[in-house]
Image (spheres, rainbow, N blue to C red):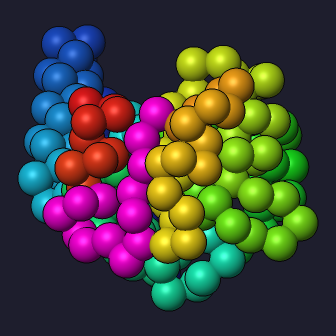
Amino acid sequence: MTCTKSRPKSTGALAHNEWRVLIWLGLIMNLKKRARGVPTEDSKLIYVVDDETMLLDLARYVLEREGYEVKTYCNPTQALLDYRRVRRKPSMILTDFQMSKMNGLELAAACRRITPSLKVALASGSVGTSAFAHHAEPPDAFLAKPYGKRDLVRMVRSLLD
């Protein structure tokens, strides 16, 4: 059904006030989204890369509730292809260390060649910090698997906030 009622013409002042109301409503809605933890247009984007889909789902659920925008990948090669292709780069990558085709350190190094200031967190249940202690480009943070919600949020906030 279409609306056939014509809109009354407004004066310049009324149009200005209409814009002011729309802007304020937009700001209020944005604040409400943030209060609920819903990602907004200015949310920080995080790539999460892991070959365990359960951990991808967990990270997405937890981080989106904290107000971050999350893009998940079970394939590090696809994550790197997207990273190279997109204009809006993530603020951070959380990646598993041990994956097929490419490990987390290799993924981080390839992304940092494009964006040297990229924050990288490495997660692993099979290696500790000694595995990358002497690496030329170590991650900014390490998260031992299995990790809990609080550990994940604390680590991300320490890197991004």
Q: Quadrant of the C terminus?
A: top left
In the depicted view, which residue is nearer to us: 128 or 92?
A: 128
Where's residue 11, x and y in %? 23, 17
Where's residue 38, x and y in %? 27, 59
The range drawn in magenta is: 140-152
Instruction: Establish if 145 lies above or below 16.
Output: below
Any part of residue 93 in sight: no
Where's residue 108, x and y in %? 69, 40
In the rendered structure, the answer to whether residue 39 lies left or right of residue 122 reads left
Where's residue 92, x and y in %? 51, 39
Image quadrant in which you'd find residue 63: bottom left
In the depicted view, which residue is nearer to us: 21 or 115?
A: 115
Outermost top residue: 12
> Was residue 144 drawn as part of the magenta stretch in this picture?
yes
Residue at 37% in and 77% down: 146
Instruction: Establish if 101 lies above or below 93.
Output: below
In the rendered structure, the answer to whether residue 17 lies left or right of residue 62 reads left
In the rendered structure, the answer to whether residue 84 lies left or right of residue 94 reads right
Outermost bottom residue: 54
> Was residue 56 drawn as part of the magenta stretch in this picture?
no
In the depicted view, which residue is nearer to us: 43 or 112?
A: 112
Any part of residue 57 in sight: yes
Residue at 81% in and 36% down: 110
